[in-house]
Each structure stands twice: as structure tokens, then as C-alpha cells.
Image (tube, helix red, strand yellow):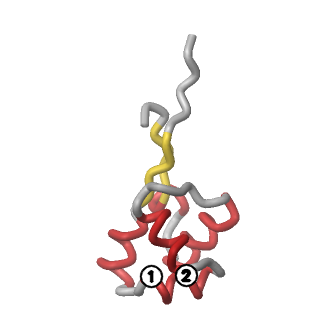
């Protein structure tokens, strides 16, 4: 039986643009990351550490599960 890796899906870009109007640079500064890291996370190319993921959710004032979800079939 093959093991599925799954994929972390995020709503960072949608939340960032729709609710808070933060730039990627501003969000990066708030959470202690680089703009390049935020770009990679938003684009689904990089899954953040749990610590960074929680900092991002907290920066938005959103529950973690509204910002990130796990797709086991992804």
C-alpha cells in the first residue's frame, strides 16, 4: 500500500488581500519571515513550520484552521 503525502493548503493570499490589505512585505515583517517565504507559502511551493503557520494565523486574527488546511489526497 502506497503512503500518500498530502498537501498543506492555505488561504493566506485571499485573507491578506480581502480582509487586511497587507502587503507581502508587511506580513513577512509581522511574522518574522522574508517576502520570498510568504510568496512561496502563498503559491503552495512551501509548507511553513508549525510555528510560522501559527504566527501567520495570529497576524490575521483568524483561527488556524481558517488559514491552513491539510488535503490528504493533494
**Residue that appears at 43% across and 31% down:** 73
**Residue farthest right in this picture:** 51
In space, the residues marked 1 and 2 are separated at their CA atoms by: 6 Å
**Residue farthest left in this picture:** 18
In the rendered image, residue 18, in percent from the top left (x then y), is placed at 30, 77
In the rendered image, residue 15, in percent from the top left (x then y), is placed at 37, 72
Q: Nearer the viewer, residue 69 or 6?
A: 6
Q: Is 40 located above or below residue 35 in the figure?
A: above
Label number found at residue 61: none
Label number found at residue 24: 1
User: 18 left or right of 12?
Assistant: left
**Dot 2: few (<14), some (14–19), or many (≥20) neighbours within 10 Å?**
some
**Dot 1: few (<14), some (14–19), or many (≥20) neighbours within 10 Å?**
many
Q: Quadrant of residue 22?
A: bottom left
Mark 2 lies on residue: 28
Secondary structure, mark 2, is: helix
Work out which quarter of the rendered image holds the C terminus and state it: top left
Q: Quadrant of residue 3?
A: top right
1 and 2 marks in contact (CB < 8 Å): yes
Amino acid at each position: 500500500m502506497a503512503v500518500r503525502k498530502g498537501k498543506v493548503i492555505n488561504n493566506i493570499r485571499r485573507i491578506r488581500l480581502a480582509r487586511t490589505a497587507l502587503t507581502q512585505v508587511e506580513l513577512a515583517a509581522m511574522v518574522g519571515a522574508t517576502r520570498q517565504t510568504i510568496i512561496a507559502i502563498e503559491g503552495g511551493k512551501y509548507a511553513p513550520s508549525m510555528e510560522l503557520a501559527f504566527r501567520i494565523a495570529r497576524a490575521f486574527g483568524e483561527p488556524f484552521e481558517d488559514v491552513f488546511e491539510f488535503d490528504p489526497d493533494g
